[in-house]
Image: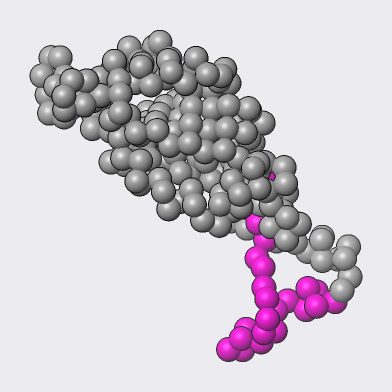
Amino acid sequence: MRIDIISVVPDLLDSPLSHSILKRARDKGLLEVNVINLREYGLHKYKKVDDYQFGGGAGLVMMCEPIAACIDELKAQRTYDEIIYMTPDGERLNQRAVNALSLKGNIIILCGHYKGIDDRIRQLYITKEISIGDYVLSGGELGAAVLVDAIGRLIPGVLNDETSALTDSFQDGLLSPPVYTRPEDFRGLVVPEILLSGHEKNISDWRYDQAVERTKQRRPDLLGE
Ligand code: ADE
């Protein structure tokens, strides 16, 4: 899978994309992530990428021409399954959307800044608009990092058995059950006995019951309650 991220602050993406699971995915050649500095497509001597908004009002708007030039260049090299714009007024991201995106081949993610992008880019190029939550970030980069992390760990071969995504919260519409490691007794709090029993079926039933109970208490909306 290939993801091209267009940003005016590419440095913001360096660290999240170069560690842990995403590093492994890239090292294994399972995920190619390419960060493009939009400024390279900026206009005139100062490589301008933003301008005042028509109609007045505070805040700059990202201009059409640099974004269009950048996306056109990418599209001339390969076809893209989605061109995603990260924005607080997009569709709220959830595991279902992440699962679907992890099956795609090539994706562009455009990060907004300032007051956002000229609406004509949304009309002409963008196929999907994604928000990572009901709050406003100073730019789309952190949202893009969240999205790429969530997608990357689902690509077959990225996670090993120990980190399998199948038992993640949300994968079966339930939150995860509690987990424990050594020691068995920590400050008087002991690990539930069933987990020490070695009885696989009982352990799996217990985990399921705990997952349902947790979901009921914390996220009844996931159970349609
Ligand atoms: N850019 C600014 N706020 C955002 C959000 N909540 N989600 C995605 N991109 C954003």
Instruction: Identify the main secondary structure in magenta.
Output: loop
Quarter of the figure with residue 1: top right
Q: How many marks?
A: 0
Residue 138 in view in this figure: yes
Q: Residue furthest front?
A: 45
> In the picture, which quadrant includes the C terminus?
top right
Viewed as shown, does residue 183 lie left or right of 44?
A: right
Q: Which residue sits at x=29%, y=15%?
A: 65
Q: In this view of the protein, which residue sits in the foreground, 109 or 209?
A: 109
Q: Which residue sits at x=87%, y=65%?
A: 200
Viewed as shown, does residue 19 lie left or right of 213?
A: left
Membership of 53 in magenta stretch = no
Q: In this view of the protein, which residue sits in the foreground, 28 or 194?
A: 28
Stretch in magenta: 170-197
Spot occupied by residue 21 in the image (x, y as percentages of width and height): 59, 53
Q: Which residue sits at x=48%, y=36%?
A: 34
